Amino acid sequence: QVQLVQSGAEVKNPGASVKVSCKVSGYTFTDHYIHWVRQAPGQGLEWMASINADTGDIHDAQKFQGRVTLTRDTSVNSAYMELSRLRYDDTAVYYCASGGAVTAGLAIDVWGLGTLVTVSS
Amino acid sequence: QSALTQPPSASGSPGQSVTISCTGTSSDVGGYNHVTWYQQHPGKAPKLLIYAVTKRPSGVPDRFSGSRSGNTASLTVSGLQAEDEADYYCNSPTGDENWVFGGGTKLTVL
């Protein structure tokens, strides 16, 4: 079955960077985008960016331009999201999700369990 | 890109039906056949409920259905059950290869 396994929780100081990994199994990694979505405590879902796992093309929300870096390693079926210049309000659960593994590309469909990133001094 | 507009809360008694709306524009909800709905229980990852406006992935009960009229998509939950109490989010692509979520609706089963 399709699975996205994310790296563990992180605690970072303001101004630092964090890198979250997302390892995919159960489908051909390069067939679909990987999306990154975050959820601050008690808040809703916020789309951040996506990467075409085949070509490496990236689309990102204007809010995160210049601070988010997406990469992928097709040799290990993994995607990575790095967020720089962390602020207190970046404290959130960060999810990776497949862009269509079970919906033939029609939706952000299968999600990882999330990675809690806490920004604290 | 502003979030899609959802009512913050909805409620119904067991066995009843509830409809949650998701309003956008012709540049997102009204312009693409990719409207998606998710269910999220506290402390859990979102779960896909409806995709491509009306399609249900395998394993999702047919009590959940989706529709759209113009720039507003809707999720209807029929025959409410206690386990349907959760947060519900809509999602749509936008015109610039980006995606946008609704603000979320907390469904309470009375």
Image (spheres, grey):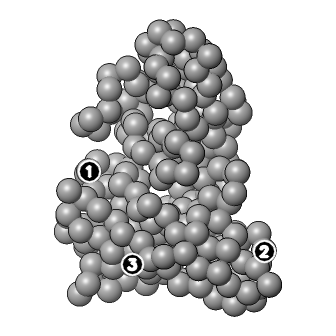
Reading the chain from its start, which is encountered first: label 2 or label 3?
Answer: 3
Tag 3: Cα neighbours inside 10 Å, few (<14), some, or many (≥20)? many
- Apparent side of residue B75 relative to residue B4 in the rendered image (left or right): left
Q: Nearer the viewer, residue A6 or A31?
A: A6
Please say if A53 is above or below B19. below
Tag 1: Cα neighbours inside 10 Å, few (<14), some, or many (≥20)? some
**Numbered tag placed on residue A79 in the rendering:** 3
**Numbered tag placed on residue A102 in the rendering:** 1
Residue B23 pos. (x, y %): 63, 33
> Is residue B4 in view from this perspective?
no
Instruction: Specify the subunit that label 2 lies on.
Output: A
Instruction: Specify the subunit that label 1 lies on.
Output: A
Question: Residue flagged by tag 1: what amino acid is it?
Answer: Val
What residue is at 55 percent from the left and 67 percent from the top? A94
- Apparent side of residue A86 relative to residue A48 in the rendered image (left or right): right
**Numbered tag placed on residue A88 in the rendering:** 2
Please say if B83 is above or below A78. above
Mark 1 residue element: loop
Residue B105 pos. (x, y %): 63, 34
Residue A69 pos. (x, y %): 54, 83
Residue B97 pos. (x, y %): 49, 61
Question: Residue flagged by tag 2: what amino acid is it?
Answer: Tyr
Mark 2 residue element: helix
The image quarter containing residue B65 is top left
